[in-house]
Amino acid sequence: MDKILIIDDEEDIRIALKRVLSREGYQIELSESASDAMNRIESGESYSLVISDILMSGMSGIDFTKFIAEKNINLPVILITGNPNLSSAEAAIRYHAYEYISKPVDRTQLLSVVKRALEVKNQKDSDLEKLMLSEKLEKALRTQNLDLNRQNAAIFNATSDAVITINHKLIIVSANKASFDMFRFNSPLDLIGQNVRILFTENKMQKYMSQVSNVLSQEPNKSTLQLSDVTLQRSDTSTFLADIAICSYSLDGDSFYTGVIRDVTQKKLMVEQLIHSERRAFLSVVAASIGHEINNSLTAIQGFVEMASRENADLMLKDRALKVTLNQTEKLRALTSNLLQLGKSVKSNTEKTEILNLNSEISSVLHVFKETAKLKYCQIKREDSTEPIPIRMNSDQFALLLSNILLNAADATNNIGTIEIKVFTQDKKGHLIVTDDGEGMSQETLDKIYEPYFTTKELGKGTGLGMFVVKQIVENFEIELQIDSTPGKGSKFHFIFPKVSES
């Protein structure tokens, strides 16, 4: 609660102001003189706002305002006077009084000024707190940076990887202890000061040096190079395979290049351990994701069915329960379809195919979505061909294919974006393009998009099966799929169906 101090040598005015402000929920304290108010503040009393008369016996309200200004306290002062004049107004401005009000004081005006003054004070307090926090964080970061430098130095010397730095002339300027052990140099002088060529075998020299030169030709801080299974040479001319990561940077105007060298034996061991860990975590991740999806749907169905089963349930609630049940049932059906698709072979997918009309199949899928309230808030823009477009495949498989693409597009646009569907014929091949204006995908996501159980969605919001199933279907029916996606600009899925023979 905001605490306000009222200073006035007239008791009636103090009481009147207190009555007005107390009714608004403010905590009020009264003082009959400026000197008494100063003593309270000197003794550590804290206030959110001060309202003071200017002309009083002893020290004036201007004196009190000057005192607050000199103390540099964030305490707004509202001055009131029955004899407004230019001199007192100038003094009020000089000592940064928040407001200058003439008597008789209007209640509405007073409350408005008090509210604004408190808002200004609270904002200044918040800004000051943020500034102090920022200074503390800056100090903490400086300390942390010093600690990190010490830690990096310790890690640099403790790591089993060789860390070697060269300059733009390809001269080795520094190396950690592991470098001497890995390359079997007895003395640091045998390695430092030498040309980096000393690390490569003669028959591999040209290949690797050309790759290193590519890094040296790039702007520092912007170039990295990964080399796998590189043949390196020890001081005793024996060789070994290693992975090398090279980064470039600029220091005091000079360019340097640091390489981290890891023996491939260690790398293979780490890969094997990673694969083992992934295998152990596989079932638990899949079970958690799919189980969460199923549990969510069953909870929604159960809740609405129970409400609709009550004797006092009205028709609207029963209708709502029916729609939710249908929607969730369709969600479970789609999930089940994706799971069942994983076990199907190419033969089972192509045994029962027929010639379908691409336009009609799209309409059927969109009709199902409409009936189950899916894509409810998305804007669907459709561009059909004037002529039927024949494709040869299974109708259920096509529905599963398009459904997964549309659901992903809806998720990418948070179910409020625009999805465009375009079909046409070119070179006697049917074309289907689905475009959305969603968040798009990075190259890293595109590289993993077909992996089973890979998903960028939160746990319970995706199983990572959709695009894996799409890939399986397009391969089974020899459909070409081209994906074009840019982060922040949406995605385009272009399906090109094989020619349909006239027979």
Image (cartoon, rainbow, N blue to C red):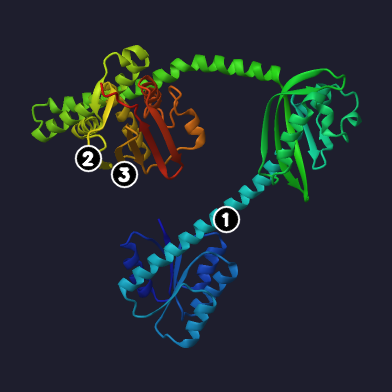
Badge 2 element? loop
For mark 1, does the 10 Å Cα neighbourhood hold few (<14), some (14 to 19), or many (20 or more) residues?
few
Query: Taking 170 as reference, is 32 above or below it?
Result: below
Query: Taking 424 as reference, is 36 above or below it?
Result: below
> Which labelled disc corresponds to residue 131?
1
For mark 3, does the 10 Å Cα neighbourhood hold few (<14), some (14 to 19), or many (20 or more) residues?
some
Q: Which residue is mark 2?
A: 386
Which quadrant of the figure has residue 370?
A: top left
* Residue in the foreground of this view, choosing between 81 and 138: 138
**Residue 381 in picture, x, y percent from top left:** 27, 43
- In space, the residues marked 3 and 2 are separated at their CA atoms by 23 Å
For mark 2, does the 10 Å Cα neighbourhood hold few (<14), some (14 to 19), or many (20 or more) residues?
few
Q: Which residue is found at the position 32% from the left and 66% from the top? A: 19
Name the image quarter holding the C terminus.
top left
Q: Which residue is mark 3?
A: 418
Label 3 or label 1, whichever lies nearer to me, is: 3
Does residue 150 appear in the picture of this structure?
Answer: no
- In space, the residues marked 3 and 1 are separated at their CA atoms by 44 Å
**Residue 321 in picture, x, y percent from top left:** 17, 29
Q: Which residue is found at the position 26% from the left and 37% from the top? A: 375
Q: Earlier in the sequence, mark 3 or mark 1?
A: 1
Badge 1 element? helix
Which quadrant of the figure has residue 169?
A: top right
Identity, as a three-letter code, of the amino acid under mark 3: Thr
Badge 3 element? strand
Q: Are marks 3 and 2 in contact (CB under 8 Å)?
A: no
Identity, as a three-letter code, of the amino acid under mark 2: Thr
Label 1 or label 2, whichever lies nearer to me, is: 2
Q: Which residue is found at the position 74% from the left and 46% from the top? A: 250
Q: Is residue 396 left or right of residue 128?
A: left
- In space, the residues marked 1 and 2 are separated at their CA atoms by 66 Å
